[in-house]
Amino acid sequence: TRFDVYLPCAEGPTRAQLRAPSGTFDALALPPWPADKAILVVDDEPAVLEIAGYLLEEAGIPFIAASSGSQALELFQARGAEIGLALLDRTMPRMSGEELRAELRAIRPELPVVMSSGFAAEAGVGQVGGRDLFLKKPYSLRDLVTILHAALRYAPG
């Protein structure tokens, strides 16, 4: 039996620490995130949504959070013009990330998607099939920001 215990940090790194020369953020040499391209972050685990939101805030990337596929679809229909990319949990109850991706792509076929999962059998960082990318949980700020930039950069259109 394997147990994974994830505890919240008492305090996370400050933006100044992330941008310090010895830190990981500036070393990425990525361009600033486009202000008109919010990330739709969808995960049924509140802790994962909170951590992803914290990381995206620290990176200066706008985001919209949803805790289910149905909520994500409602947000996408209402605020789709703001959303430039979707970060989807692959395994969620009622509507999986795969099903949600199909629904989102029915509305906007060119939408860049990054699938995410914490299951050990899943791959690390890379392709998940076709043009979509995959990010294994738990992920670092470096991994998250790098893959989001890559997904946006290689999006069609």
Image (cartoon, rainbow, N blue to C red):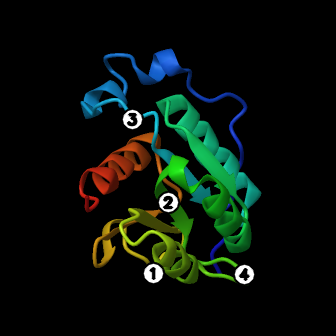
- Left-right relation of 31 to 77: left
Q: Tell me the crowding category of disc 3: few under 14, some 14 to 19, or many 20 or more residues within 10 angstroms, Cα based.
A: some
Q: Tell me the crowding category of disc 1: few under 14, some 14 to 19, or many 20 or more residues within 10 angstroms, Cα based.
A: few
Mark 2 → mark 1, Cα distance in angstroms: 22 Å
Residues tagged 1 and 3 counted as in contact (Cβ below 8 A): no
Residue 99 visible in rendering: yes
Is label 1 or label 3 in front?
A: 3
Q: What type is the residue that disc 4 sits on? A: Pro
Identify the image quadrant of residue 129. bottom left
Mark 2 → mark 4, Cα distance in angstroms: 18 Å
Badge 4 is on which residue?
93
Badge 2 is on which residue?
86
Badge 3 is on which residue?
33
Look at 38% across and 50% down and name the residue there: 148
Dot 1 falls on a residue whose secondary structure is loop
Is label 4 or label 3 in front?
A: 3
Mark 4 → mark 3, Cα distance in angstroms: 31 Å
Mark 1 → mark 3, Cα distance in angstroms: 31 Å
Which numbered disc flags the more N-terminal residue, 1 or 3? Answer: 3
Residues tagged 4 and 1 counted as in contact (Cβ below 8 A): no
- Left-right relation of 94 to 51: right
Which numbered disc flags the more N-terminal residue, 2 or 1? Answer: 2
Look at 43% across and 77% down and name the residue there: 122
Which numbered disc flags the more N-terminal residue, 4 or 1? Answer: 4
Is label 2 or label 4 in front?
A: 2
